[in-house]
Amino acid sequence: MLLHIVARGKIGRSSEAELVERYLKRIAWPTKVSELPDRGGSAPVALSNAVTVLLDERGTALSSMALAKQLERWRDGGTREARFMIGAADGHDQSERGAADLLLSFGPATWPHLMARAMLAEQLFRATTILANHPYHREG
């Protein structure tokens, strides 16, 4: 299953970009990052049988284990692409939230978009290592 981060705004050459790249390179699953302008532009066409996850402060805060289990259910159910959408400064509109398969929150705090992208990349790496029984994720 493709893990596809679709983010508004350019990350450029930054320490956050290096962190995102570091985690995504370590994921054994296929990954892709698509950047959109802050305003306008549209997301790339999704693969058939894709799910959409919006990062939204009003969403559900999942533990790393719960995120791994959700990815596993989608993968085992034949989902070909999980699209993780990071919105612009104003977030996502109501129609986008209503159409999403999951609203995912990293807690009630508002995070800078570049940090949210790095945190998402790390959580995707962690989730895939959980599913591979790799020792990166340790509970307790």
Image (cartoon, rainbow, N blue to C red):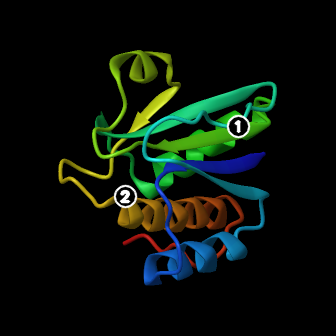
| Residue 44 circle label | 1
Up/down of 67 relative to 140, above or below: above
Q: Quadrant of the N terminus?
A: top right
Label 2 amino acid?
His
| Rendered location of residue 52, percent (x, y) | 58, 31
Which of these two is toward me, 76 or 112?
A: 112
| Residue 19 circle label | none
Instruction: Give the residue at x 79% y 57%.
Output: 30
Crowd class of label 2 (few under 14; some 14 to 19; many from 20; radius 10 Å): many
Q: Residue furthest left?
A: 109
Residue of label 2 = 113
Up/down of 26 relative to 81, above or below: below
| Rendered location of residue 103, percent (x, y) | 41, 33
- Decide if residue 77 is on the left or right side of residue 138: right
Q: Quadrant of the C terminus?
A: bottom left
- Decide if residue 73 is on the left or right side of residue 93: right
Instruction: Give the residue at x 55% y 72%.
Output: 20
